[in-house]
Amino acid sequence: MHKWTQAVSQWFKQGLPGYCAFCLTARAFHAGWCDECFAQLPWNHRRCEQCAEPLVGQAGQRCGHCLVEPPSFTATTAALCYQGPVTSLVHDFKFHGSPRAGMLLVELMLSRRPAQVGDALLAVPMYPARAKARGFNQAQWLAERLGERIHKPLLQARCVKHLPSQRALNRRERQQNLLGAFTVKSPVPAHVTIIDDVVTTGATGHALASVLLVNGAQRVDIWAAARTPLQKS
Ligand SMILES: [Zn+2]
Ligand SMILES: [Zn+2]
């Protein structure tokens, strides 16, 4: 797997110069996209600084959820909204295992990286049977590439509870579902950045960050490619 992704990564860097991944015109110079497509991506400009939920209406730094019941992580970087071409990209990566889509997500994440990255990166772990069924853990894949690029070590955590799809659950149900789901390998450094592909409610990040804080972390942040707008409360 590692060799294969390295080979594909090389192919991505060397084999597609000049072609935009989104419009396929020969105008991209370095990152895999052209300036126009990059500008038109669904950027999550006005977002809660803690959970990255897109903010609407009144100006503010944090969303209502984070003000009323602050999650255990400090800040979330999720520069894109999970919609349009970003949804297609994540689907190609996650469900069809497209390494080209994965590399694009890595590049997009690096283009809007957090102001402060932790001492180590930690991918959101997947229950082993689920990772086996999918063929890989997409968050781990992203964390490995990001770690190589920004020279950060990777922490290891495990998901010890089978989590049925969280999609149909509301925020409270997700939190219940995630109790006791994660264990983390010590020692845990002071500042950890959790890596995920898409943040939905932040419930997973909250559960994982709580475990990290109990095990010695002083600050935990989240760095994801995209954020879905909240639909349930
Ligand atoms: Zn383009
Ligand atoms: Zn928030």
Image (spheres, helix red, strand yellow):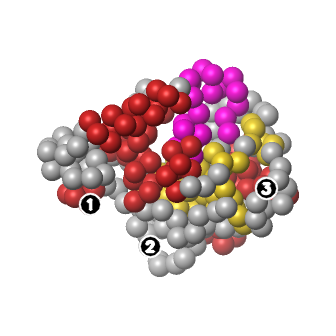
> Is 142 inside the magenta-drawn segment?
yes
Residues at discs 3 and 1 in contact (Cβ within 8 Å): no
Question: x and y percent of residue 105 in the render?
Answer: 42, 46
Residue beneath disc 1: 39
In the picture shown, does residue 121 fall above or below 3? below
Residue 51 drawn at (x, y percent): 59, 62
The structure residue drawn at horizontal position 53% and vertical position 30%, both measured from the top left corner, is 2
Q: Which residue is mark 2?
A: 57
Please name the residue that numbered disc 3 is placed on: 188
Which residue is rendered at x = 30% and y = 52% of the image? 31
Residue at the image position 29 percent from the left and 39 percent from the top: 14
In 3D space, how far apart are the residues under numbered discs 2 and 3 (Cα atoms)?
A: 39 Å
Residues drawn in magenta: 125-143
Q: CA distance from mark 2 to mark 1?
A: 23 Å
SS label for mark 1: helix
Is 95 placed above or below 151 here? above
Q: Residue furthest top?
A: 133
Mark 3 crowd level (few <14, some 14–19, many ≥20, 10 Å Cα): some
Q: Nearer the viewer, residue 168 or 203?
A: 203
